[in-house]
Amino acid sequence: MSYNELYEHKKSDTVKWMLTLIAFIVVGVLLAGILAGWFDKKEDAPAAVTEQTTVMDGGMSVTPTSATGVRLMMAQAAAEVSPLAETSCTIKATIEPASARQNANWSLAWANGSSAWANGKTVTDYVTITPTEEGSLTATLACVKPFSEQVILTVSAMGNADKTATCTVDYQQRLNINSLKLGGATLSTTSCGFKAQVDETHTMEIDYSYSEGTIPYLGKSESDYDEFICAGIAFTDEFMAAYNRANGSGDDLTKRMKRANLTSSAAHTREIEFTDGAYGNTVFYQLLDGYLTDEVIAAMRSAIAEVGEENVFKVGIFKTDNAISASYVECDTWYKLGLDLNTVYMATENITVDQSGVVF
């Protein structure tokens, strides 16, 4: 082997060793980073988790407030609950670490048991908590009836009673409608007690009360405006379908609503205009999106003849912060309202006779 060949061979071996050494260093750095990241993750694991407030149907709302080693999550109740329950949800507790004893105790208490409302009342007569089984991390929270003092739900770890999680349980007031009148007649959900008349203004009046609750029925909307109780008048689905069939090439009716604020007046009354015109957003202008033309009235008369005078309108009550919008709101309860067919015609503009005089 010549000197040059020996030199090149040694040079090649040196390069290989250097590359191998670099590779070991890179692998070592990566392993160190992974291990450091794993330990950092273990050390940074949060001890407390607070979930977002969830408002359940029926007025009950649940808000986790604190957690030390145990955290809570909520979902719609899947298990059977008492038939007396107004609403319910499933509460799941998580105990950390996973190697700890996975059992929990559940309890309920008034936030202020000595308050004027809660004093002398048993919390479980209003709210119940039922574990899936003894010591289970899953339980069903049920509201039996409305309550006006906040409830505190506490879950504690059986392996260490100092580790707990709590959440508040509230009840938002419900609106109880005692009566709803239009034109002095009481409206019903089962039968038509009043038929409105075209070109008339009828007064709507509501009598209502609130249920028990820790949260007022009326509050602030998502837009941060004050909410109020609103009546919404809409055409029935049957009337709209019949109208659209009779209207030929005219514009179809779509779901719209004439709104009326019923809380801004001290007597909870509001005048509702069934007149033809845009002033004051009258019922017909709002629902028909225009004036009562000959074509519109012809289609209305045909639709009323098909579905009946007592099946033209429906009235729903809801809370909102906007009485100007014509946006339709689907209400849980609808009151029946009719329209007198004898008033559905165009105003007389003139009258003629085919003879100027008669001589006998």
Image (spheres, helix red, strand yellow):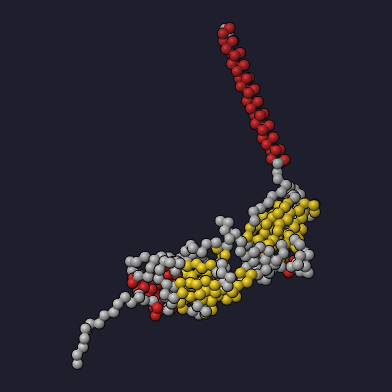
* Image height of 96 relative to 251, above or below: above
The reply to whether residue 153 is in sight is yes
Does 46 sit left or right of 319 as displayed? right
* Image height of 205 relative to 133, above or below: below
Residue 246, image x and y in percent? 35, 72
Does 163 sit left or right of 267 as displayed? right
Q: Residue furthest top?
A: 3
**Residue found at x 36% / y 73%:** 297
Name the image quarter holding residue 166.
bottom right
Q: Quadrant of the C terminus?
A: bottom left
Residue 147, image x and y in percent? 70, 67
Residue 230, image x and y in percent? 54, 67
- The residue nearer to you, when weighing 114 against 22, is 114
**Residue found at x 55% / y 61%:** 321
**Residue found at x 66% / y 71%:** 83
Residue 315, image x and y in percent? 51, 72
